[in-house]
Amino acid sequence: MLDEPMTIPDDPEELRSFTARLLDEVKAQAVLIEKLRHQLAGHRAHRFGASSESIEQLQLALETSEIAAAAMVARMKLPDIEDKSKPKRKPIPDHIPRVEVELSPGSDACADCGGHLRQIGEDVTEELEYVPGRFIVNRIVRPRFACACCERFMQSPLPSRPIERGRPGPGLLAHVLVSKYADHLPLYRQSQIFDREGLDLDRSTLADWVGKTTALLEPLADAIGRHVLAGEAIFADDTPVRMLAPGTGKTRTARIWTYARDERPWGSDTPPAAWYRFSGDRKGQHPKDHLARYRGWMHADGYAGFEELYRSGAVREVACMAHIRRKFVDIYRSQGSAVAEEAIARIAQLYAVEKEARGSPPDQRAALRRTHAAPVFDELEVWLAMQLTRISGKSPLAAAIRYALTRMERLRPYLDNGMLELDNNVAERGMRAIALGRKNYLFVGSEAGGKAAAIAYIVARLDMNHPAWRQAGLFQPRREQIGLRHAPEHLPGQARGDPSGKTGRRRAIGGAIAAARHLVQAAKRQPAFGQAAVKLREAEGQRRQRRGVIALDRRDPLPQRHESRIGTRRGHGSVGLLSGWDSRHCVPHLFRFKP
């Protein structure tokens, strides 16, 4: 209409009609402008926001400025000026080993009068030092003995190793896993770091180690998954990762799902954990398979793939207030809307109640919410419904209000149940490591690589400092499990002290790897394993004899349909499928053995 020639009618009725149509056109264009501004602000935030490289460049610039200022102070020999606004530095933790160096005058006599010096006190200054990591080689010597009478040979068996016929020890494998999945170092960068130490460890070799190690840790990951799904309330979310599409030279979008359990907000002693699963797409069938045996509450966003779980009645939904608040924050940042600002302020009152209730038992949390949070929650719903009638139904603000009203109805159960949370931030925090990691390794090579990554994230992201895990000894294998009877309590390459932090995480995962390999070796000595191997070989022998093939030799590997080439070398063993073995005892279904 605005493109038409400006001819104002003289008739009053036509003028009223013209004015009404003009106002409708202006309103439509105003709504369109508002939408475009909102979209533009979203694109700018995505491209130049805090989650992009701009904040990293800003931090780098600040670090460079601080380094330059410190260097100038050192050159000018100026005294350090303590900033009163800065918090005082924390003391060095007690579990860090101390190396004491005593500086004495060198003589017991006074330099002035020659009198005897007696100690009246001492000054202690602690300096934090770093000893670079070092590699060691464990030489396992097994003497051979022969009987003087019957000439029988005797030799101790080779202890179990994480990778059969491989050279890495549990500590090195744990270091590679933690560096990749906790410190976000791709394997090619680790290969360059090892090269500076004079070790030729190619990226493909490290990738092979990661695949075989995650196969050993799979029973542990399954056990952690059962621990997560045993909770009465879990947190679910997913995030995209790029997966290489074979034959195209391109990537496609895959998914990593997380299911987390954290009962610390209501005072439970149950250790928190997260269970990760990988899938090649985002179909709703995947969470349905993951949670087939779960019964309880699930915090999640509005993903439509979860709806089939809710319809079954086994899983009850709890919506997320953080997703509701995020939409109003985006609108306020892009448009400065007063309605969005008021909504954010009202939601902040709900989080203030949660802050007060954190750490209390479930019944006290529920009582506190009914008293203080329920009135705010009800008023927020009424106020949002009223605002929806006053604004254009096509604006982004109206869409945010409609989303909020829909999700708040599914969030209401948290008011009466102290074991539920106001948001799904537990699951979103579990996804943070994956979001950081995919910026470095860019994509996974295949579905097998994605599943291996999910297993590694389960173990690498576990809170190993929780007293329950430490008391159970899950990550502290005994010497007989590692296979070294006369080994000291502190094995080479394992750090003493508190198992928290990066060093403790490497030690704990190294212990889990050694224990998993020991369990596999122990399974090989079980009668059921030997009988299954014999049956497989007898069946193959009969098949070959029917085809006129000679009998099997002891060193002849099983046919390819009974083996997997992942983690094996041709002629050096096979992988047999023992479907009757129970993985609940931390023994994998796939075993590698010599025919």
Image (cartoon, grey):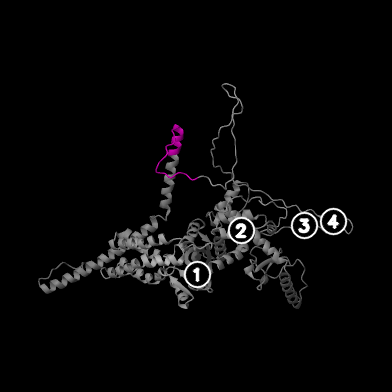
Other residues around mark 1 within 10 Å, as few (<14) / some (14–19) / many (≥20): some
Image vertical order of residue 105 relative to residue 578, above or below: above
Find disc 3 in the rendering and name its residue.
156
Foreground mark, 1 or 4, reads 1
Residue type (three-letter) at the residue carrying disc 3: Ser
SS assignment for the magenta stretch, majority: loop
Disc on res. 475: 2
Find disc 4 in the rendering and name its residue.
146
Residue type (three-letter) at the residue carrying disc 1: Glu
Q: Quadrant of residue 115?
A: top right
Label 1 to label 2, Cα distance in Å?
26 Å
Disc on res. 232: 1
> Sequence-wise, which precedes: disc 4 or disc 2?
4
Foreground mark, 1 or 2, reads 1
Q: Residue at x 47, y 67 (%)?
A: 236
Please state which of residues 354 and 581 is positioned toward the viewer in this rendering. 354
Q: The residue tagged with tag 3: helix, strand or loop?
A: loop
**Disc 4 and disc 3 in contact, CB within 8 angstroms:** no
Residue 175 visible within the image:
no
Residue type (three-letter) at the residue carrying disc 2: Phe
Q: The residue tagged with tag 4: helix, strand or loop?
A: strand
Q: Is residue 295 left or right of residue 390?
A: right
> Sequence-wise, which precedes: disc 4 or disc 3?
4
> Sequence-wise, which precedes: disc 1 or disc 2?
1
Residue 595: x and y in percent read: 74, 67
Residue range highlighted in magenta:
69-90
Residue 353: x and y in percent read: 38, 62
Label 4 to label 2, Cα distance in Å?
39 Å
Residue 76: x and y in percent read: 44, 32
Other residues around mark 4 within 10 Å, as few (<14) / some (14–19) / many (≥20): few
Label 3 to label 2, Cα distance in Å?
27 Å
Foreground mark, 4 or 2, reads 2
